[in-house]
Image (tube, rainbow, N blue to C red):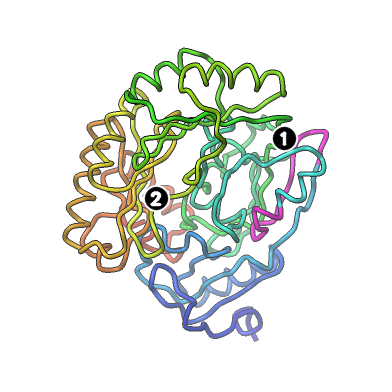
Amino acid sequence: MTALDELTEPAKDDDAVAGVPARLVAAPTSTAQASAVLRAAADAGLAVAFRGGGTKLDWGAPPRRLDLIVDTRGLTGVVEHAAGDLIAVVRAGTPMAEVREHLGPAGQQLALDTSEAGATVGGTVAVSASGPRRQLYGTARDLVIGMTVVRADGTVAHSGGKVVKNVAGYDLAKLFTGAYGTLGLITRCAFRLHPRPGAEAVVRAAPPDLGAALAAIRAAQVVPSAVEVDGETGEVAVLVEGTPAGVRDRAATLVRILGDDAGRPHWWGTYPWEPGGTGLKLTAALSRVPALVVRAAALARVRGSAGTGVLYAGLPPDTAPDEAADAVAELRAAAGDAGGHAVVLTAPAEVRAGVDMWGPVDGLALMRRVKQQFDPDARLAPGRFVGGI
């Protein structure tokens, strides 16, 4: 009897990745079990994809083929929380909400914003998701300092450690972050933590001149944790965190610039598309964010982080495929003119068929060499990533 016989079950109707159904599902409860499953899958030549909470399973291109889904929701729990060192080691299938609850009593946080209920640590890292506060705290790639992974052949590998500055060895953690499971299975991560702020305030308004407002915020040097914009309402919302006195003073400065102190808007930290719609990630040079917001808002619902040049655009689910393809092309051109890129994160099947999900990306030859090194048989989420990787 093999590990596939012992640890897999026949897939159900909803066991699919971006619309591609699987034949088998495995739910390992340890790195050792995950290793055994992937080793057996390699021996059988199975195509494999990984699943956490499933909140972003429709992101990226559909796999070219799929035999087995490895579900990480049996790999849960905070393994270690070294509060004095501001470090936590967490299993991949742990919900982000559970991590927040665990760290809260110590006055600490993993500063990765996730708006979807059920999002797991592994899935968040695998797609390198981040939210408004990336401006102050960085992205998943900045906060992961160590990782345990299982490679395509079942080999278990460890990268980094439990100190913030670890320069020894090849940094697998940074490679696996944002790789959409195409290089291997993440089973646990070590994160750098931050103290929870004693106070926070959000100042927001709909300024008549977005560019002038953003320039004034930058010049004020109020050290915002996030500067968010929404194309539909025309609002700018700025979050400041810190000590109560510091927040009070910086918020007062922002009120003089923007004019209101009204709390987080309803659109804060949410993606501008509905389930079943088309969603894109747009990037831009900071100086060109205002122009991109105006141009993108004429084509789609748009919002995101003006402070980091990362915006999101959404098209309704009922958008005709040819109209969606035209809008994607125009949004991609707008992002390019703004010094950035546009990537289609999710879309209905009929829209996916007519667009290049990833678009032109620098460094593709290097990415292919890395994929060849880690997954020479191209069995891990084949076709999900840039350039059909």
Quarter the N terminus occupies:
bottom right
Q: Tell which tag, 1 or 2, sits nearer the viewer.
A: 2
| 336 up-or-down from 65: above or below | above
| 9 up-or-down from 230: above or below | below
Left or right: 321 as drawn, with respect to 232: left
Q: Residue at x 38, y 72 (%)?
A: 19
Residue in front for this viewpoint, 259 or 7:
259
Residue in front for this viewpoint, 375 or 363:
363
Q: Which residue is mark 2?
A: 272
Left or right: 152 as drawn, with respect to 246: left
- Identity, as a three-letter code, of the amino acid under mark 1: Arg
Q: Position of residue 377 (x, y in %)?
A: 42, 64
Q: How many marks?
A: 2
Q: Residue at x 46, y 59 (%)?
A: 375
Q: Residues within 10 Å of mark 1 (few under 14, many from 20)?
A: some
Which label's residue is closer to the chain start, 1 or 2?
1
The secondary structure type at the circle numbered 1 is: loop
Left or right: 9 as drawn, with respect to 290: right
Q: Position of residue 245 (x, y in %)?
A: 71, 19
> Image quadrant of residue 282?
top left
- Identity, as a three-letter code, of the amino acid under mark 2: Pro
**What separation in Å lies between label 1 and label 2 (alpha carbons)?**
28 Å
The secondary structure type at the circle numbered 2 is: loop
Quarter the C terminus occupies:
bottom left
Q: Which residue is mark 1?
A: 196
Q: Position of residue 220 (x, y in %)?
A: 50, 13
Q: Which residues are magenta?
A: 82-98
